[in-house]
Amino acid sequence: MSMNRRDFLKLAGAAGAGLVVGGFGGYLLSNAGRQQAEGAGGEGIRLKALWIYVGPVEDYGWTRAHHDGHMGARGKLPWLESSYVESVSEDKAYDIIKAQLDAEGYNAVFATSYGYMDALKRLAAEYPEVRFYHCSGPWEEFKDLPNVSTYFAEFYQLYYLNGLAAAGATETCNLGYIPAFLIPEVVRHINAYVIGAVEGARVMGKCDGGRKIRVLVTPPLNSWFAPDKAREAARLLVETYDVDVIAYTEDTTAVLETAESYWDEGVKVYSFSHYTDMYAYFKSQGKTLRSHLTGQISNWAPIYVDLLVKQAAGVYEKVDVWARLGDYTPIRWARSPSESRAGSPEGAVYLAPLNTEAIPPRMLEHIKLRYEQMKELLFEPFTGPIRGYKIDAQGRPQEEARMKVKEGERLGRNPLWTMDWLHENAETL
């Protein structure tokens, strides 16, 4: 694509315009009111992109967050034409994407699930002129494919903060986690949650200074979208193991709704937002949740805008985007706790609204302190000493607990990205 200076300025100006979020469609293939890929002045800046979703846009979790980001990018980039296909299973991804490329001639494809990796490897080799973007995929898998980039909005710092909040709210010292799969992404989120809970109990002087914190991890659901199984797992944790705060990786509101149902029975159980602001969603439906403690939220729009503008400007380069706290924010330097943005939207990942009735003031201040420190990279949850034990894909222990992170050691990207061990305070069921 060739571009003159006027075109580039229009492109950059469009990207800097206000964010507009569009509506949602409930059908398989959507043009979502297809916008024509024209520059702000009608000149020839054009880019045509396809999004592939693993679940339905109405899941109010992972896929809804990606769809919000997609629509946000469309609102910022008037030269972008885009479509999406929802509920694409991993075994059908290759055929569906290939059919769309042949029929529509897309310049960019965003594949929003780890399981699309094999399909993208084949497609990238067959369509070298197309730019493929794989969400949550390890960049090492695509190192020989120059037209594939990887990207992710990383949550482990937010799960650590969730653990702090859980420690502040728990009355039983028994916490829970419901994983979709026990892949490294989910394992590091579980461990971050445990690390936060142990630290939080120590700060609050409860649960024997954190030594009695238990995080019960259910068997993996083996699906990202499994609301019925998630509800069943939540009930197991509450009714069999006396768990009163439940974190999870599953792409619906099922766990949060189950936690809320216990309040109607006079039992306090808390849970979290996951990928979208579920507290706000239920409030828009006329229901104020008592069970919502805080949570992890992603805003994919700035990542999508960043990648698309570079491609449209002709300055594409193969990248691995791993967005964490502070990334894509106007100011990433640490604010004081009294000025903290914790609990408000900012950047690509941020903390859901904080339940100030359930989380004690001392813990609220500590959460805000850590949130700001992590934005400026002044604090890392995975700093030793940390003890743990290796697990298999079903969570079965493969060894006795031993030192995994030495005193003063701070884990970097690679050991976090390949994590296959659980913190010693986590117990698999």
Image (tube, grey):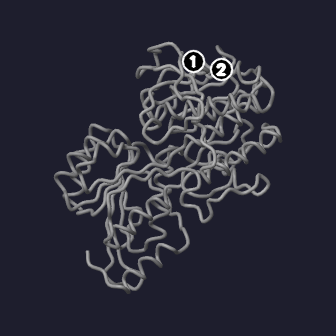
Residue 264 visible to an observer of this rendering: no
Looking at the image, residue 51 sits to the left or right of residue 19; the answer is left
| Looking at the image, residue 418 lies above or below residue 108 | above
At x 49%, y 30%, the residue is 187
* Nearer the observer, 161 or 408: 408
The one nearer the camera, 342 or 228, is 342
The location of residue 153, given as percent across then percent down, is 49, 49
| Relative depth, front residue between 220 and 232 | 220
The x, y position of residue 348, in whole percent, is: 54, 55
- The reply to whether the C-beta atoms of the residues labelled 2 and 1 are less than 8 Å apart is yes
Under mark 2, the amino acid is Arg
Residue type of the residue flagged with mark 1: Glu
**Residue of label 2:** 214
| The N terminus, quarter of image | bottom left
Question: What percent of the width, then of the height, locates residue 406?
Answer: 55, 29
Q: Residue at x 54, y 50 (%)?
A: 324
Which quadrant is home to the C terminus? top right
Q: State the SS at label 1.
A: strand
10 Å neighbourhood of mark 1: few (<14), some, or many (≥20)?
some
